[in-house]
Image: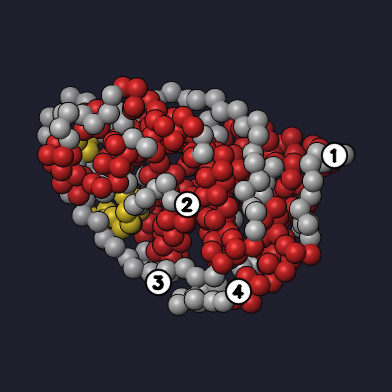
Amino acid sequence: MTSTNTNPLIRLEDVLRLQQMMQLKPPATLPLSFIGEDVKLIKEIRIKVKKANQNNVTRTQAYLDYYQKHPEIHWAFLAHLVSRNGGYYMTDLSTTLIKSLLSPEKQHAYFLFLEHSNSAIFHDAYAQLLLYEKSKEQNSNLFHLLPAFHISSFMKAVWDDFWQHRNKTLLSMALIVNEQYHIEKNVLFKKEFQRDVLHSWQFHTQNFLGMTQIVFPYYSGNNIDLCGTKVYHFESVLKRIEVGKTLYVLLFYSNLHDSIYTFSLKHPHTGSRSDYNSDIFTKNRTHSKKLYSPTLTMSWGDRVHLFLRKDEWFEDEITFSLLESIPASSVKKIPLQHHIKVQSAIKAANPFS
């Protein structure tokens, strides 16, 4: 395996060590049986995951609460911020702007796609995070229990390695890769999402217009600014992984982390974009001079998800090459007025409005 790493936050030797560990420890085969305290712990974690997986707001808050307790798990804060954006996308579907693009049936299909993706990632990742928390409490490696939650064998090796070597960046990169392949295998391949969302002209129009921006609000003095990136070609798992890496570097290898963290603590997530700018957005539908941006509870009710089966996504060792290099940090400020520009572009581009 050759390295093309131009920003060596992860050393090649760390990736090779992880790869060798995976080769030495073949994945466990299901069904597995657990006894005694293991059974109690598995049940406890499942209950906590289900409770926190109520909706996008509860998931987003759970990630932040976890990061406050375990700041060495960088990915939890990244997940909090990305999940905030997932909530923004969900509530955007209830705005007049998006209703000019999408029929009620399409709005519902898009919401289910966003909601199921957000929920599936949380269901997979939060169990891992809670098992790490229990491992810390007991000062004992409990990752032999990961198969009980149908976690990829790839992550079993990653957590074992993190327990010994504490490489925060390697763990974060691995979680980014894992969660994107997880939804690729278990969500995006579903026929209804392929038909109703990913292959629709509206989805590609949103990509073209840059509506799939991920924004991180942060304090600049007493003002709130935005940084982030655009997501193009969401249907490509490699593009999504690259975006995740870029956002991670932006968050932890720039000087913005503390300002972003301060915003997150001061402004609980509601799903409304007025959380980060009340001059442009409002939760009041009747306000004529601002863009309507409702809260999640004003837009959509809770959904019950049945995760009856999670397919193993890890197939070959080519995956390890995705951990080797991450993009250099390029902090990009996003003007708060970009939403108004997008609105004008949509009205010009949409022949059915």
Q: Residue at x 44, y 60 (%)?
A: 242
Q: Can you say whether 167 is above or below 218 in the image?
A: below
Q: In the picture, which quadrant includes the C terminus?
A: top left
- Expressed as whole percent of the image width and height from the top left, the position of residue 159 reads 68, 58
Check disc 3 and give the amino acid type: Ala
Check disc 2 and give the amino acid type: Val
Residue denoted by label 3: 328
As measured in the structure, the alpha-carbon distance from the residue carrying label 2 to the one carrying label 3 is 20 Å
Q: Earlier in the sequence, mark 4 or mark 1?
A: 4
Mark closer to the observer (2, 3): 2
Q: Can you say whether 65 is above or below 23 in the image?
A: above
Asked if disc 1 and disc 2 are in contact, CB closer than 8 Å, the reply is: no
Q: Is 287 situated left or right of 274 in this image?
A: left
Q: Is 159 situated left or right of 198 in this image?
A: right
Residue denoted by label 2: 237
Q: Earlier in the sequence, mark 2 or mark 3?
A: 2
Residue denoted by label 4: 1
Residue at disc 4, secondary structure: loop
- The image quarter in which residue 18 lies: bottom right
Residue at disc 3, secondary structure: loop
Give the colour scheme of this rendering: secondary structure
Q: Residue at x 49, y 32 (%)?
A: 191
Asked if disc 4 and disc 1 are in contact, CB closer than 8 Å, the reply is: no
- Expressed as whole percent of the image width and height from the top left, the position of residue 102 reads 27, 28
Check disc 4 and give the amino acid type: Met
Mark closer to the observer (1, 2): 2
